[in-house]
Amino acid sequence: MKPIEDFDLDAILARYKENDAEFDEKEDGVKLIEEGEWESGYKDYANRIDTYQHIASRRFFDIAQSRAGSYYSHYEYNAPEVYEVYPHVVTRTVYSAKKPKDVA
């Protein structure tokens, strides 16, 4: 299979569905950046977001998935959604207490 050459979200989503919700980095030209965890929502609903990079364009996108059901029976998956995302670098300053000087 030929890698996805252009950053086209419709083509990316179509390939994702063809590959049974997976990408192969070499075959598809898409790299997994962060695999999300299934996060429980209301009752038996859960959501997951995976972040990928389209290698040729160096652009990023998320694929959001949702499901309903139970671990003990089965899950029904909704159609995945794809959208472009941008990386942001966040700097955080943390303050720590100093040890007090010995009291004479």
Image: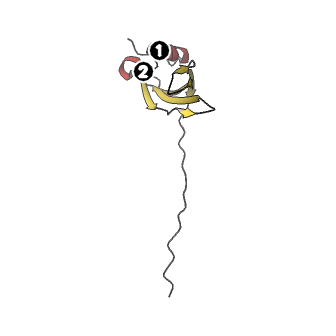
Mark 1 belongs to which amino acid?
Arg
What residue is at 54 percent from the left and 18 percent from the top?
9
Q: Where, quadrant-wise, is the N terminus in this rendering?
A: top left
Which residue sits furthest front? 72
Q: Quadrant of residue 70?
A: top right
Q: Secondary structure at mark 2?
A: loop
Colouring: secondary structure
Which residue sits furthest left? 26
Residue 73 visible from this viewpoint: yes
Residue 57, position as x, y percentages in the image: 47, 23
What residue is at 36 percent from the left and 20 percent from the top?
26
Q: Secondary structure at mark 1?
A: helix
* Residue contact at pointers 1 and 2, CB within 8 angstroms: yes
How many residues crowd around disc 2 within 10 Å: few (fewer than 14), some, or many (20 or more)? some
Q: Would residue 81 be found to the left or right of residue 25 on screen?
A: right
Residue 78, position as x, y percentages in the image: 57, 19
How many residues crowd around disc 1 within 10 Å: few (fewer than 14), some, or many (20 or more)? some
Residue 58 visible from this viewpoint: no
Residue 23, which numbered label? 2
Magenta span includes 98: no
| N-terminal-most mark, 1 or 2 | 1
Residue bounds of the magenta highlight: 87-95
Mark 2 belongs to which amino acid?
Phe
What residue is at 50 percent from the left and 79 percent from the top?
101
Viewer-side residue, 44 vs 26: 44
Query: On the image, numbered disc 1 is attached to which residue?
Result: 15
Viewer-side residue, 24 vs 5: 24
